[in-house]
Image (cartoon, helix red, strand yellow):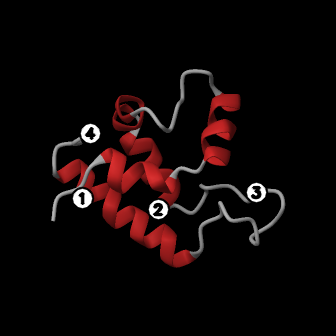
Amino acid sequence: MSTSFAGTIKPYFTAYFRAHMLNFSANFDLWDPKVVEAAWPAIYNQISGGSMPTPLTPPATYAGTWDNLTQAQFLVDFQAWKTDGYPP
């Protein structure tokens, strides 16, 4: 099974996460596959280290938060996307 940014990775990045990161940096658009590819090591390290995604307001009941299973699956999918050559 191959991965793609549009079908595999982008769905993890909710509109809330995208807006949050654009507030952090106008050039850090989580819906842009080239931006995410360029930041792949930093994103992977932040998520695998547990510092991202940061807690959202309201807390964990918010639909955009990740539980431990979602975080673990993201890391698997994110690695596969890289291994597959970052397909769009």
- Quadrant of the rendered structure where residue 33 is? top left
Q: Which residue is mark 1?
A: 80
Residue at (46, 46) in percent of width and height: 43
Q: Which residue is mark 3?
A: 56
Image x and y of residue 39, in percent: 41, 36
* Residue 65 as seen in the image, left or right of residue 76: right
**Quick check: 31 above or below 67?**
above
* Residue 58 as seen in the image, left or right of residue 60: right
Whether the residues at callouts 3 and 1 have beta carbons within 8 Å, the answer is: no
- Choose the circle earlier in sequence order: 1 or 2: 2
Q: CA distance from mark 4 to mark 2?
A: 23 Å
Instruction: Determine the secondary structure under disc 1.
Output: helix
Q: CA distance from mark 4 to mark 1?
A: 13 Å
Q: Which mark is residue 47?
A: none
Image x and y of residue 25, in percent: 63, 25
What amino acid is found at the position of numbered circle 1 in the picture? Ala
Q: Which residue is mark 4?
A: 88
Which label lies toward us, 3 or 2? 3
